[in-house]
Each structure stands twice: as C-alpha cells, then as structure tokens.
Amino acid sequence: MSENIVASDSFEAYLISHPFLGKPENLYNPMNYIMQLGGKRMRPKLLLLAYQSVNGHPGKDVYQLALSIEAFHNFSLLHDDIMDNAPIRRGKKTVHEEWNTATAILAGDNLLIQCYDLILKTSLPNKPELLNEFSIMATQVCEGQQMDMNLPTQEHITDEEYLQMIRLKTAVLPACALKMGALAANASMDRADVFYDFGLNLGMAFQLQDDFLDTFGSSEETGKQEGGDIIENKRTLLFLHAMRTLTGSDKEELLHWFNEKPDNPSNKIDRVRTLFKQAQSDQFLMNLKADFEMHALANIDIACENSSNKAHVLALFDLLKTRKA
Amino acid sequence: MSENIVASDSFEAYLISHPFLGKPENLYNPMNYIMQLGGKRMRPKLLLLAYQSVNGHPGKDVYQLALSIEAFHNFSLLHDDIMDNAPIRRGKKTVHEEWNTATAILAGDNLLIQCYDLILKTSLPNKPELLNEFSIMATQVCEGQQMDMNLPTQEHITDEEYLQMIRLKTAVLPACALKMGALAANASMDRADVFYDFGLNLGMAFQLQDDFLDTFGSSEETGKQEGGDIIENKRTLLFLHAMRTLTGSDKEELLHWFNEKPDNPSNKIDRVRTLFKQAQSDQFLMNLKADFEMHALANIDIACENSSNKAHVLALFDLLKTRKA
C-alpha cells in the first residue's frame, strides 16, 4: 500500500515536469537552473513521508507543497551563494556566476515569492496553518543565516549560540517540511509537532555530521574542499570545545592557526585536526550528534505509531545518519 | 465622518509604532532603517483610501495590510539599490552601504517574508484573495525589474515593451494596493477591479511623469541628479520616440550621445534635451500621460460612486498629478 517515497523518483519527476513558467526568460531560467541541479531532495521527501505516515498516498496538492519546500531550500542556496561569493554549486556554476549578481538576487526573490504562490494555489483545507508554519520557518532561516554571518566578528560564542544558529539556519527547514506534511494530512497539532521535533533533531544531527565531515572527511568522501571550515577559520563547535579544553602551548597553537590563512593550508589542516583530536573535540561532537539522533528516534516512534510507513521513515533516517557527503 | 487619510499622518504613526522585531539586531535594524527613511507613503495611503471609500473607517487589520504594501515597496527599493549599486536613498546611505551587501540581501529577503506574515496575521475574512493578489503583484514586480535590466542590451525596444516594463515594475503595486483595500472592505470583485485599473492608470501616469522630470526637471525641483536617464543612456520612451521621429544628422547626433558617457555631461544633457524637444518627444510623453490620467479619472468616478470619500481620492490624485518630485 505505501509507496517508498524515499527510494522512488516520484518527487524528482514531479519537479522536472513542473518548471516555473514566465517571462522574461532570463528571470525564470536561473530559477529552473538551480532547481534542476539535483540533490537528495531530502526536505520534500520528508514532507511526503510525513503525509504518507498519517494519511496514505499523497496527491497533487501535497507534491505541490513539497515543491514549495524544495524551492525555498533553493532560494536560500541561491542567495547564500551570492553572500558567500561561491563560484560552484553541485559541480556547476552558481547562478550569479552563470548570469550575474543582479539577476541572481532577483531570481532568488521570485523563487521565494513562488514558494508562497505554490502553497496558495493548493486547495488544502488547512492552507492558513501551512502558510503560517512556512512563514515562521522562512523568517528563522534568515535569522540563522545572519547569526552565521555574525560569528567571525563575534567576540565570545557559547555552544548554545552556535547550536541555535544551526537550529535556525538548517534544522527548522526539515522540521517545517515534516510538520507541513503531517498538517496537510490532517494530523492533530500535537502529532504534527512531534514530526516537527523529529525534523529538528534530525536536522541538528545532520548539521553536526556536516561539521564533522567538513573537518575530518576526505574530499573524495565529501566531494567538497577538504578542511574548508579550518581554512576559513570558522569557529564551529569543534573549535569552541577545543579552545576550552586545551591549555598552554596547544591552546596557543590552535589560536595561532585560527589567525592565519596560509596559501598552502595542508599543514594547518593536519595540525588543527590533531589538536581537535587531542582535545577529544571529535568525540564531543559525535556524542552531541548521537543525542540528537536518539531524540529523533524517539520522535519517530511516537509520530509513526501504527503506521505501515514507519519502516520508510527509519530507512530515510538511516540513510541520512550514515551519509558521508 | 471620513477622515482625510491623504493629509493625515495616521499611517506614518502606525508605521513608526510597529517596527519589525527580532534577532539578530543587525538583521532587523536595516529593515526598520529603510522603512523609516520616509517618503510619501503613497501606496499604503491608496490602500486605506480604497478601504474607506467602500466601507468607512479602517481598523487595525487594514493598517497592517497597508504596512505590508509599504514593506513590499521598501523590499524592492532595498534589493534594487544593491542591483543598481546606488549609494544614496532619500538623502541617507543605502542599506548595503550602511551595512554590507550580504546583510542587505538578507534584510530584503526577510522584509519580503514579513510582508506575507503581516497579511497572514490579519483576521480579515478574505485573506486568501488578498494573499493571491499580493503574490501576483510581487511576481510581476520582479518580472518588470528584470525587463528593465534587460533594456540596455536589448536590440530593439517597442513602445509597448517599454510601457509593459513600467506597468509591471511600477504600476501594478499601487493597483494592487487599491484592490486589496477594496477587497478588505468587502467590495465586489468587479468594483475592486475598477480600483485596480485606477491604480494601474495612476501608476503609469506617475512613472511617465517621473521619466519626464528625470529628463527635463531641474535638480532643485526633483532633488535628484539632473538628467540621470540621459547620463546613463537609458532608452526611455523619449528616446524611442525621438529616434523614430528625427532624421539625418539630428538622428545621428542623438545616437552619438547615447553611445557616450562624457565626464562632464552638461553639454550632452543640453543637446539631448534640445533634440527631444525638436522631435516633440516631450509632447508625445505628456499626451500619453494625459491619456492615462483621463482613464484614471474615469475609474475614480465608477469606483467612488456614492462615496463621501471621492473628494479625498481626487485630492490625492491631484497631488500626484502636479508633483514635481
């Protein structure tokens, strides 16, 4: 009865057959360009899974809702890439590189407007709640992005501030996707909130894994520049933990590296990795990640109770948990 | 009974007492900064006027709707200023100059999200229609902005293409404001559409007047750089008309100037103005503007029938019609 949305390409097929249409072409082409660069389509799949867990097979309106979530994710990537001056996204030129910054800003704006439009054009009975959830999430993602941009010049950062930043910047989006899927399926607000918490815990674990891989993963595994956070002197949880754990010359050395940007960073990456491991900051991060995963699993148990779909949710969860990239 | 919203400062007071609140501060400060730079608040006043013409005194929800329209206007100014590299807005530094480009992009994004949020948080019965109208307008403004950015590299431009560009970039916003005000007051869709047409014709006349002042107004009158469009070689209706009217060496001279950017532009401005007048392009533009004004007046007659508020609408209309800046 319950189709495996995680494994299926049904969302990808829906996305490809529903490009954004309008003129001028050089406004709409960049929107469709970024939407079709690929990716795991994790967030829309979470929305569809939540729907399915509550109420069986999702129809056209629910796919449209899922598309809105994927469009929002792409809007934020598009504008983030401008802010970060990033030349490459998923192995292709970023929108501002392929077109120009002005068009990239505008295409992002229109993508954000089309997110609301997609939700507005569904005929789901609880559209007002869906729009509210979406809007709260969208605001929070902006707040998280600004918090992230503030980190380099912020004098003191607490773990909680860092966690709040990734919560807003990364975790509320999958949380919102799951809650919207549940709400669209007429779940009670209580049950929808459990889906939200599942997404939040999943998103936190996901981002901490991302931080871990960025520092300790090889570029063969991740497909990204090795040690990018170290090169950029990003004060992630690993750095915050190591700074309060190390003493004497070790602490001084770490601080030294985080004030340098050597042309050849390989020695810096090696040394910082070693210092992080010496402080057991890698273990600290993995323990924290495990906590979030444990909570996510508990959420699944409640949210998917009596649902034949639970196996699929767990499959997605395992997929995300064990990912290397 | 009917308060004169055009003359009153009630909207300004509402705006000042309803700043956007949230953290981090350097995300919300730029949003409030641009909102509080001043301006005529024409678009929210049009919304309030339309409401008043249909249904008496507007309450809190309608002011919130008007704030959403003003926030959208400011969102588009904020992002346009980045795209245009503009250093000054209303005599103050633009947001990307006062903060930086990344924060300006993000503050604009959040301003756009807050527009939807403001509408969502009203308890007006026809919220779905209001959100639809808003979303259509928002999409069109993006399309108009991209069309405007395409003009410099576009080989051939027709009058209709230019008019369509200003219709989308400028006129649909006051049109939407008026229609939303009427809809919020439970006007029939037919009557609301007449308000829309009024706003569209008013907006077109307004923009053509803007084009006229940019070329023929003095900087004392307009408070802007004199002959800005001429300096930038903008192919406005004046240029399009003059190019098809002038012949021989006059046409060649005009074309010559539009391929030059002299350090001291005063001679260029003088000569282009003279050529435009010789082609009677100024008269052409004023005739076109008069057409739109005539249609706007006819719309007012229908939209404000039996309304004690008609005098106020006409007063605003006259104010906009005779403006020099």
Image: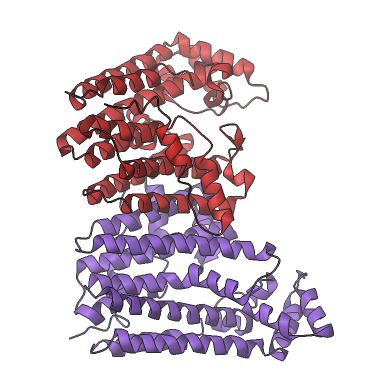
Chain colours: A purple, B red
Image side of residue A41 versus residue A60, left or right: right
Between A187 and B144, the one nearer to me in the picture: A187
Residue A306 appears anywhere in the view: yes
**Vertical placement of A245 versus B16: above or below?**
below
Residue B45: quadrant of the picture = top left
Q: Residue B14: give x, y in percent of width and height.
A: 42, 40
Q: Residue at x 37, y 75 (%)?
A: A196
- Please report the residue visible at 20 percent of the width from the left and 21 percent of the height from the top: B301
Q: Residue B183 location, x and y as percent?
A: 22, 40
Along the line of sight, which residue is nearer the eye, B247 or B177?
B177
Q: Is residue B152 left or right of residue A116?
A: right
* Residue B35: x %, y % from top left: 49, 41
Q: Quadrant of the N terminus of chain A?
A: bottom left
Looking at the picture, how far across and down is residue B38, in whole percent? Answer: 51, 34
Depth check: give the residue in front, B21 or B147. Answer: B21
Q: Quadrant of residue B193?
A: top left
Q: Residue furthest right?
A: A249
Residue that lies at the very extreme toward the top in this rendered image: B278
In the displayed structure image, the side of residue B170 where residue A181 appears, left or right: left
Residue A12 can be seen, yes or no: no
Q: How many marks do you count on the picture?
A: 0
Residue plotted at (42% across, 65% down): A73
Q: Tell me the residue at 41%/85% (across/down).
A: A296
